Amino acid sequence: MRPRTLAERQAALDALRRELAARFGAHVLLRWEQAQPQRAARALPTGSLALDLASGIGGLPRGRLSELAGPPYAGKRTLAAHAVAQAQRGRGWAAYLDGAQSLDPDRWRALGVDLADLLWALPRSLPEALAMAQLLLRTRALDLIVLDLRPGWAGRLLARGVRRLRPLARRAPTALLVVRDLLPSEPDAGLGGAALRLRLVPDEELWLGSARAGLRVRPLVQARGQAEPVAVPVALELDERAGLRRAAELFDLACWLGVVVRHPLGFLGAGTVLGRSRSAALARLEAEPALWARVEEEVRARGLSPVERPVAGAGR
């Protein structure tokens, strides 16, 4: 099946907008930027370097269904927002089917999401959400579709709906990400046929004085063909306002891989002393983009073989 041209994709999106408005009401908001997206990559970056490396292909696979799950308030929607922002930075088009009604516009803008170029819909039921996802996939015009499920939207109806979405996704250059809460009363059976399963396990809360500043979570990644999920070797720090603390993630990955090492002078990496403490090293990485790029290049070059062990040398 040949890829659609930009004009064909735009025509399909215009038709989709009219059909969505007719079938589901005026709560669907849509404005598309006239730009040619970069669609050659097999995967869309998640916004987390650790998750991209652990996935084995660089992020969320196109043409496949991925699942992001965890207990409530574990940072799932924060990571979903980062994935949307990454798709937009690559000049791609994204949709967010907000069944959980969790999208906070101000916070998402702070995380880098361009809401003016995001298709944001509020399905009122699971059948409506699944019908919207089918319509979006059939256009073959989107790069990322996030289906955010409301707690309680599960069971056989969801399983049947996922089975119908999977063949549609295979025909499209679209990464389909399903976000759902794992409740203590429900077994974690996972979505059948998911090519990539991401689980977030809360590790500890982060506090600044008496105020809760964020959360540290441990991701588990299970790609198709793996019998058990594998722990990503670094924890992700999620700030209440700024989202993923990317500098902390990069530093911890660099320590784990030996790109940054401990020395009597401080932390050494990329041929320089980053700082005498972890906080000083993070501040310098954030202040010097060229240094950040050198450290990230070395981390990507060494790759990441997920194993279940704590971060070594992070010097908390």
Image (cartoon, rainbow, N blue to C red):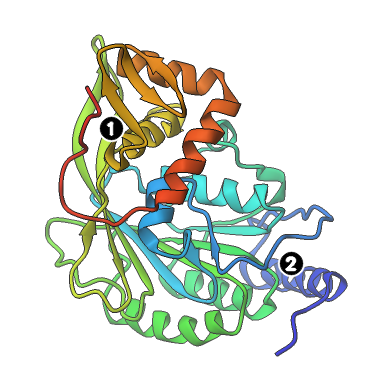
x%, y% of residue 28? Answer: 65, 58
* Residue at (41, 36) in percent of width and height: 250
**Mark 1 packing: few (<14 Cα in 10 Å), some, or many (20+)?**
many
* Distance between the alpha carbons at the discs numbered 2 and 1: 38 Å
* Residue at (22, 60) in percent of width and height: 230
- Taking the image as shown, residue 92 lies to the left or right of residue 275, namely right
x%, y% of residue 143? Answer: 63, 64
Residue 164 bears which disc, if any?
Answer: none
Residue topped by disc 1: 215
Secondary structure of the residue carrying tag 1 is strand
Q: Nearer the viewer, residue 50 or 144?
A: 50
Please name which of the two marks, 2 or 1, marks the residue nearer to the observer: 1
Q: Amino acid at mark 1?
A: Leu
* Residue at (60, 59) in percent of width and height: 95
Residue 17 bears which disc, if any?
Answer: 2
* Residue at (47, 34) in percent of width and height: 295
x%, y% of residue 180? Answer: 33, 59
Q: Amino acid at mark 2?
A: Arg
